[in-house]
Amino acid sequence: MVITRYHGHSDHIFALAWSPDGRTVASGSRDRTVRIWDPSSGETLIVFAEHPRYLLSLAWSPDGQRIASGCTGGIVHIWQPMTGHKLLTFPHHVRFIRSVSWSPMGDYVASGGEYGDSTVQIWQSTTGEMQTIHRSQYRIFAAPWSPTSNLIASGSFDTTVQIWNPLSGELYTTYRGHSGPVYAVAWLPQSRLLVSAGHDKTVHIWSAEIGETHFIYHGHSDVIKTLACSPDGASIASAGNDRTIQIWSAQTGQLVATYRDHHTWVRAVAWSPDGKWIASASDKVVHIWPNPSQ
């Protein structure tokens, strides 16, 4: 059952994120805007339109006071979600910023570049000063920062996921379980496990420490482009070109529910901080719907 359908964008939506307090949702689109809106009413609250190219990625700071958003023009902006005021521009990527993530304390941002770039760049969130550049993968699609430690897991077109220290650049583990490009990576809450998915139509859960595969989920019939873990780490939502969002157990891989209300491919999915709601984006519309595993 869909609670809200948000129609504020005029083009495809590629990024979604709930605010840390769960009161608002941010969505980024090919229409070059990030929109902050009320998930219960669908009312648009703030429109950020400073990007020169398509929006591909966004993330709230841990305290909810800032948003980092990246576009196909190689630019990351940091701005205030309450006012839309731009605080900082980081222009050092070449093109296609597929991923932005914050350090646990909010003092650093990791931004990952795809076409013509192939770097993950670590920089101070208040000054833009560069800390580290990770260059050992080809075309970065995802680079989430661990919410509890100084580790980043970067997934790329070269089929690998690498775990490394964002401040020193030291590489710890390389996961090679996928047979195609890795489009989505997430840290499983309350565990030492990672979740990754991509072109091979599978989702892998594996050990961040040694790169050992725990199990592989085979429920999708086409390429997987996005995934998200529930806040309690019990469930995973995965979605992509087969137009479905599949909710399944992170412990057993058992399918709990399949959401089929989108009419084209799904590019973004996000859980609310309390785990009660899921936001999913397809084409120009965002759906808000209840977590079927509760």
Image (cartoon, helix red, strand yellow):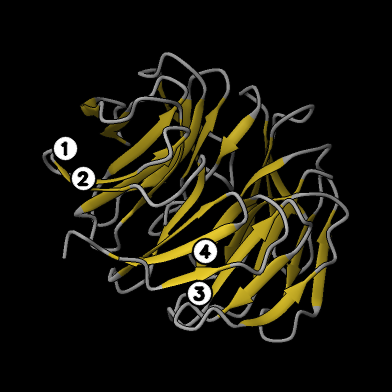
In the image, 135 versus 292, the foreground residue is 292
Q: Is residue 152 above or below residue 62?
A: above
**Is the Cβ of the residue at disc 3 closer than 8 Å to that at disc 4?**
yes
**Is the Cβ of the residue at disc 2 closer than 8 Å to that at disc 1?**
yes
Disc with the residue nearer the chain's start (1 vs 4): 4
- Residue 92 placement, left or right of 111: right
Q: Which residue is mark 2?
A: 248
Name which residue type carries label 4. Ala
Q: Which residue is mark 4?
A: 17
Name which residue type carries label 3. Ser
Q: Secondary structure at mark 2?
A: strand
Quadrant of residue 88 within the rendered picture: bottom right
Rate crowding at label 2 as few (under 14), some (14 to 19) or many (20 or more) other CA atoms within 10 Å: many
Q: Residue at x 61, y 63 (%)?
A: 27
Disc 1 to disc 4, C-alpha distance:
25 Å
Q: What is the residue that sits farthest to the top in this orientation?
A: 179
Rate crowding at label 4 as few (under 14), some (14 to 19) or many (20 or more) other CA atoms within 10 Å: many
Disc with the residue nearer the chain's start (2 vs 1): 2
Name which residue type carries label 1. Gly
Disc with the residue nearer the chain's start (3 vs 2): 3
Q: Which residue is mark 1?
A: 253
Disc 3 to disc 2, C-alpha distance:
24 Å
Disc 1 to disc 3, C-alpha distance:
28 Å
**Is the Cβ of the residue at disc 4 closer than 8 Å to that at disc 2?**
no
The dot on residue 19 is: 3
Q: Secondary structure at mark 3?
A: loop
In the image, 122 versus 290, the foreground residue is 290
Whole-percent x and y of residue 269?
Answer: 45, 53
Name which residue type carries label 2. Trp
Disc 3 to disc 4, C-alpha distance:
6 Å
